[in-house]
Image (cartoon, helix red, strand yellow):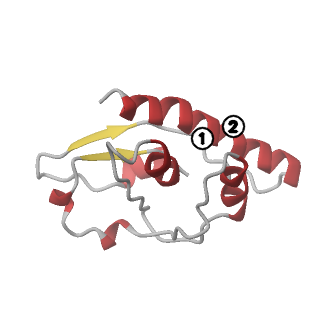
Amino acid sequence: MAEGMINHFLPDKWQAYSAGIGATAVNPQAVEVMTEIEIDISHQRSKSIAEFNDPSQFDLIITVCDAAAEACPVFNSGIQQVHIGFNDPTADTDNTYEIAIARFREVRDDIRARLIGYLRHR
């Protein structure tokens, strides 16, 4: 969701690439809640950090979940790393659809407020 929002709201200032500790499928509920704000992330794919073997190509690395902040490699190339943590909307898998989609909306809105706000002023 963060990659989609950054590339949608700040295309003249930033180009975002997202990756995780391991690649997984893009969550359909993430696609759904992003569509609600007219951002299509259905074409995105989950990527592993291993795909980005040359961190010097980046100006900034932002971790967005606590697990990634703890497991993300430290790049010694002088690139600034920042952690802006968000709740994992998939953390509790015993939820009904309504509860799960509400969590995705909360995280989406939090990303828009805090992450986009942070990058807008950098």
In the image, 26: left or right of 12? right
Foreground residue, 18 or 71? 18
Residue 115 drawn above or below residue 71: above
Q: Residue at x 39, y 48 (%)?
A: 11
Residue named by callout 2: 106
Task: Establish if 114 lies above or below 32.
Answer: above
At x 11%, y 46%, the residue is: 78
Which is nearer the N-term, disc 1 or disc 2?
A: 1
Residue 94 in the image: x percent, y percent? 82, 55
Residue 105 image-quadrant placement: top right
Near-viewer residue (29 or 65): 29
x%, y% of residue 63?
39, 46
User: Residue 58 at x, y = what percent?
Assistant: 22, 54
Which quadrant of the figure has residue 37?
A: top right
Dot 2 falls on a residue whose secondary structure is helix
Q: Residue at x 46, y 44 (%)?
A: 64
Q: CA distance from mark 1 to mark 2?
A: 9 Å
Check disc 2 and give the amino acid type.
Glu
Say if mark 1 contacts mark 2, CB within 8 Å: yes
Q: Which quadrant: the C terminus? A: top left
Q: Which mark is residue 87?
A: 1
Q: How many marks?
A: 2
Q: Give me the residue at 21% from left, 47% from top.
A: 59
**In this picture, residue 57 sits left or right of residue 13:** left
Q: Residue furthest front?
A: 12
Q: Quick one: label 1, few (<14), some, or many (20+) residues within 10 Å?
A: some
Q: Residues within 10 Å of mark 2 (few under 14, many from 20)?
A: some
Disc 1 on helix, strand or loop?
loop
Three-letter residue code for mark 1: Asn
x, y (%) of residue 25?
59, 71
